[in-house]
Image (cartoon, rainbow, N blue to C red):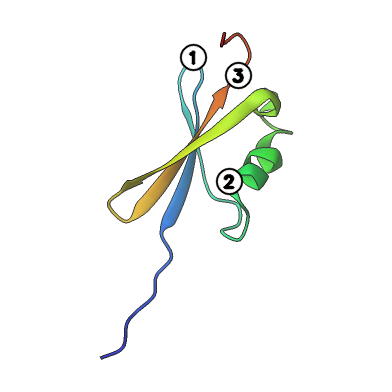
Amino acid sequence: MAIKKEQLRRSFIIERRDGDITLPDPDNNMTPDQVMQFYSNTYPELVTSSCQGPVYKNDGMTFTFKSTVGTKG
């Protein structure tokens, strides 16, 4: 019996005050930080964000991009 290797599906969420945005994985060979940089042209707030996660659920994992602007600490 052979072991089947599967890659988990990834999703990325931008947390925003006006509602979260779920982004598809542009390339599963990219690191989460590379994905954040990839989307930063479309979503400029990602330039000052940090990546949190992954959170594993069912057959996938979710990374969350949170803005670090305006946070103390």
The CA distance from mark 3 to mark 1 is 16 Å
Amino acid at pointer 2: Pro
Residue 15: give x, y in percent of width and height. 49, 24
**As displayed, is residue 72 above or below residue 59?**
above
Residue 6: give x, y in percent of width and height. 39, 70
Report the quarter where the N terminus lies. Answer: bottom left
The residue under the point 56% across, 59% down is 28
Residue 64 located left or right of residue 43: left
The residue under the point 32% across, 56% down is 59
How many residues crowd around disc 2 within 10 Å: few (fewer than 14), some, or many (20 or more)?
Answer: many
The residue under the point 61% across, 61% down is 29
> SS of the residue at dot 3?
loop
Residue 48: give x, y in percent of width and height. 68, 23
Amino acid at pointer 1: Asp
Residue 34 located left or right of residue 9: right
Examine the image and state in which quarter residue 7 appears.
Answer: bottom left
Examine the image and state in which quarter residue 51 appears.
Answer: top right
The residue under the point 34% across, 47% down is 56
Residue 16 located left or right of residue 8: right
Question: Which residue was labeled with disc 2?
Answer: 32
Name the residue nearer the viewer: 72 or 36.
72
Amino acid at pointer 3: Thr
> SS of the residue at dot 2?
helix
Question: Which residue was labeled with disc 3?
Answer: 68
| Marks 3 and 1, the one that precedes in the sequence | 1
Examine the image and state in which quarter residue 38 appears.
Answer: top right
Residue ranking furthest to the right:
41
Question: Which residue was labeled with disc 1?
Answer: 18
The CA distance from mark 2 to mark 1 is 23 Å
| Marks 2 and 3, the one that precedes in the sequence | 2
